[in-house]
Amino acid sequence: MKTVMIGNTRISVLSGDITTWKGDVIVNAANSGLLGGNGVDGAIHRAGGPEIMEQCKEIRKLQGGCPPGHAVITGAGNLDVKHVIHTVGPIWEGGGRGEALTLADCYRSSLQLAIEVGARTIAFPNISTGIYGYPKSPACDVALKAVSEFLQVEPLDHRIEQIDFVCFEMDNVKLYMRWLERFE
């Protein structure tokens, strides 16, 4: 584990399974249909149980899913957190179709939702780097820049105290650790 401070917020990189993380909110790298899938999405739905899927179905009825760069929130079912924020990352198409902006929006919209529900701790997976094909190093750069910029403008009365990047693959752990060394 590696931890640095950005302002008053602890940013950590952890190796492991996000479904076992304990805190206020975990972020799910969802698909636009919100009906589960592979990777992180499937793992969260399996570990959280049917309650999460039922709430995702209700969101679909109300708004037809979730577009890339946006986020929605559900309960956590059987997970040891209060909420799951589902965000839809971009599918990598070479980098010339606004993928970086959409990916940054995933992190910003997730943090904003976390603040709205009073969360003090949040855990992110490596959004879009699996089946969506976003190259891991640029995705890491976008993620950490978006989070650090968000923290610089976030109102102090709604402070996120801890942000964990929970990486399932060791190459992502190493990328995030190197990036965080800039803040030491």
Image (tube, rainbow, N blue to C red):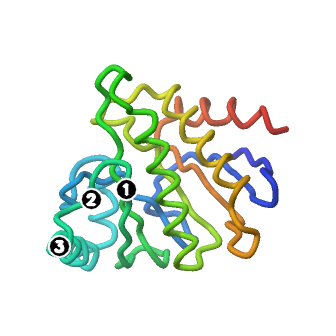
Residue 113 pos. (x, y %) = 49, 68
Say left or right for 94 vs 127. Answer: left
Say above or below: 12 vs 24: above
Q: Which residue is mark 1?
A: 70
Q: Could you tell me how many numbered marks the image carries? A: 3
Q: CA distance from mark 2 to mark 1?
A: 6 Å
Amino acid under disc 3: Lys
For marks 1 and 3 on the same chain, the one whose residue lies earlier in the sequence = 3
In the picture of the structure, the residue carrying the numbered disc 3 is 57
Q: Helix, strand or loop at disc 3?
A: helix
Front one among 103 and 34: 103
Which picture quadrant has residue 76? bottom left
Amino acid type assigned to the residue bearing label 2 in the image: Cys
User: Residue 152 location in percent, x, y?
Assistant: 73, 53
In space, the residues marked 2 and 3 are separated at their CA atoms by 11 Å
Q: Which residue is mark 2?
A: 66
